[in-house]
Amino acid sequence: MTPEQIKLVQQSFNKTVPITEKVAKKFLTMLFAIDPKLKPLFADDPKGKRLMATFTTFVKGLSKMDSINGIAQQMGVRFKRMGIRMDDYMTIGAALIETLAFFQKDDFTPSIRQAWIEGYGVIASIMIRAANEQSI
């Protein structure tokens, strides 16, 4: 990710802070519409509060990856234990990006979308790698 892409992601995400609960609800609705079998995996966070806190941590940490690398690895192992598979990361990423696009409308430009794709890809790849290295 370039420094400009990191800045775009962080600025874009900051727009969701005042409406975090709405964003979380829409994200979960979109996610479960895309793949209903993921619903039980998020049963312990029905309003998406922990999920949004995690997204916040990752977005803030994009500018200093070494500070979130360990968190992403731990989360990847936890996700594997929860039953989240590699292809589920694509579904989660798609739901996240479409949720942001829904709320940001015309402000969600192609360059911001691409920055989010890159950013999510970086974090997801760390999580997937850690999950694959972990034996349950």
Image (tube, rainbow, N blue to C red):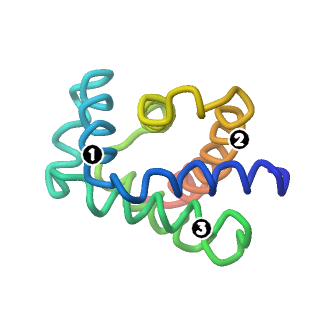
How far separated are the C-alphas under marks 2 and 1?
22 Å
Q: Nearer the viewer, residue 24 or 127?
A: 24
Residue that carries the numbered disc 2 in the rendered image:
115
Q: Which mark is residue 60?
A: 3
In the image, taking residue 122 as reference, residue 43 lies left or right, namely left
Q: Is residue 130 above or below residue 124?
A: below
Q: In the image, residue 86 lies at what x, y percent?
A: 49, 37
Marked residue nearer the N-terminal end (3 or 2): 3
Give the number of the mark in front: 1 or 3. Answer: 1
Query: Badge 3, how many Cα within 10 Å: few under 14, some, many 20+?
Result: some
User: Quarter of the image holding residue 95?
Assistant: top left
Residue type at tag 2: Ala
Vertical placement of residue 4 versus 33, above or below: below
Q: Which residue is mark 1?
A: 22
Which three-letter amino acid code belongs to the residue tagged 1? Lys
Alpha carbons under labels 3 and 2: distance apart: 14 Å
> CA gap, disc 1 to disc 3?
20 Å
Left or right: residue 22 compared with residue 74? left
Q: Residue at x 73, y 72 (%)?
A: 64
x%, y% of residue 17? 42, 59
Q: Position of residue 11 (x, y in %)?
A: 63, 54
